[in-house]
Image (cartoon, rainbow, N blue to C red):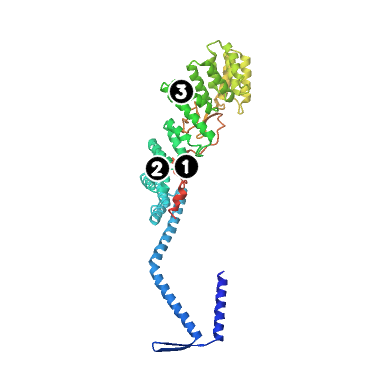
Amino acid sequence: MRRLAAIIALAVLAIAAATIADYPGAVDIIWQGWEVNTSVGVLLASLALLALVIWLLLWLITAAIRLPRNFRRNRRARRRRLGDMALTRGMIAIAAGDGTVAKRQAERAEWLLGPTPLVLMLAAQVAQLDGDEAGARLRYTALLDQKDAALLGLKGLIGQALQAGDAAEALRLAERAHQLRPNAVWTFETLLALRTRAGKWDAARDTLDAAPRRNLLPALRAQHHRGAIFYEQSLAAELEGDRRRALTLAASAQDLLPDIPAAAARHARLLIAEDRRRPARRVVERAWQKMPHPDLAAIWGELGGAVPALELVPWVEKLAEHNPASPETAVARAEAALAAQLWGEARRHLGEAIAAAPDGPTRRLCLLMARLEDSEHPGEGRAREWLDRALAAVPDPAYLCAQCGGANTEWRALCAHCQGFDTLSWQASGGARPVPAPVLADLVAPAPLLPTPDGLASAGQSVR
């Protein structure tokens, strides 16, 4: 396009020059006693030269006036370019674990760019990498004064509080972060985790209630979390002596936790304590259909009453009718037959349970077989073989944590090993679910790169 404009301009000039050459003419100028005689072409050329000289003078004057401003602008651009380069090199050094280079680049970026959000974040992480928690806290605190980056500062301060074991301070900061950005997933998850760890179940329930509406948690998962909170509130109510409220909460927990046998077992035991045996029986029967469990079988035995062992066999058969194909049903039948000294029935049911075990008999099944052999054939040493197998047998199903993989002897809303909330499920030791990212562990562990929660993109605008 520029070439075309230049060609057109040259063509116009050529036509004008040819026209003047064809019609030369003469010009006489008389002014204040001065007289000038020249041709039209020379006059036009002189005027063009004069205009060029005036334009050059004006350009020089304007350039001289703008020189300081342009110098400052170019200097700022150069500092920003060098500062961005130092930021990049600092982040790469942190990722590589090179604290010396990261510190040097962070100081250079802070000198070139000033206390911008990204510079403060880099400096804070360098300080943490260097073990300077006070310096990191100073920079995280400075981020709180910057509207777009306050969330980054709060996240860093929460991590420091957790690392120092100050759960109360971490909770206070998490509440502030959630108020600042209630629709951010990590603020919700952090606040929920800290409130549950602190045993603040009412506050945790309030946090959870708004999650599905804000698309922070799937509705089914929120329902499961709510059931876990009801379970813990039921335990607390029982400790306080409010058995009626404990029973109501246990019933709600069972409805929301159909995959957790402990919820049904607790509900049934509270009903038995109130001498409501028929409703307790229905609770166990309903739970056995969905998730058979040894605790449910034990409660069913209590509901059978203090009768001879032989009379408990048909009572256990009534429970078995609700889930006859389950391996746990076979075990319950075998234990009832063992207690009644029905060795053949016990052996048959234990054989069914062992055949259903994908990785061979578990420790519990081996011990039951040892008990059977010792009871049916005392003194023959057959039990010894099963006792030896029990030592190396597959572990029994347990409440395994999906976060740390630890086995828990009882179900609680918090894992006894990692304090993960609602992470336990009844399963075989080799059937752990995929491990999700631990929210609080992410905050405590030094990040290899700058974190990127909501707000980082907007915080980066101030650097540019």
Above or below, 158 relative to 249: below
State the SS at label 3.
helix
Mark-to-mark CA distance, 2 and 1: 17 Å
Q: Are marks 2 and 3 in contact (CB under 8 Å)?
A: no
Does 156 sit above or below residue 27?
above
**Which residue corresponds to mark 2?**
157
Residue 176's spot in the image, x, y percent?
40, 40
Residue 246: assigned label: 3
Q: Which residue is mark 1?
A: 184
Image location of residue 287, percent across then percent down: 56, 23
The answer to the question of whether label 2 and label 1 lie on touching residues, with beta carbons closer than 8 A, is: no
Counting the numbered discs, the total is 3
Q: Which mark is residue 437?
A: none
Instruction: Tell me which amino acid carries mark 1.
Output: Ala
Residue closest to the eye, 186 or 163: 186
Label 2, label 3: how far apart the Cα atoms are? 38 Å
The spot of residue 359 in percent (x, y) is: 60, 28
Lower position in the chain sequence, tag 2 or tag 1: 2
Q: Badge 3, how many Cα within 10 Å: few under 14, some, many 20+?
A: many
* Mark 1 → mark 3, Cα distance in angstroms: 34 Å
- Mark 2 vs mark 1: in front: 1
**Could you tell me the amino acid type at mark 3?**
Ala
Q: Looking at the picture, which amino acid does disc 2 mark?
A: Leu
Query: Is 227 displayed left or right of 68 in the figure?
Result: right
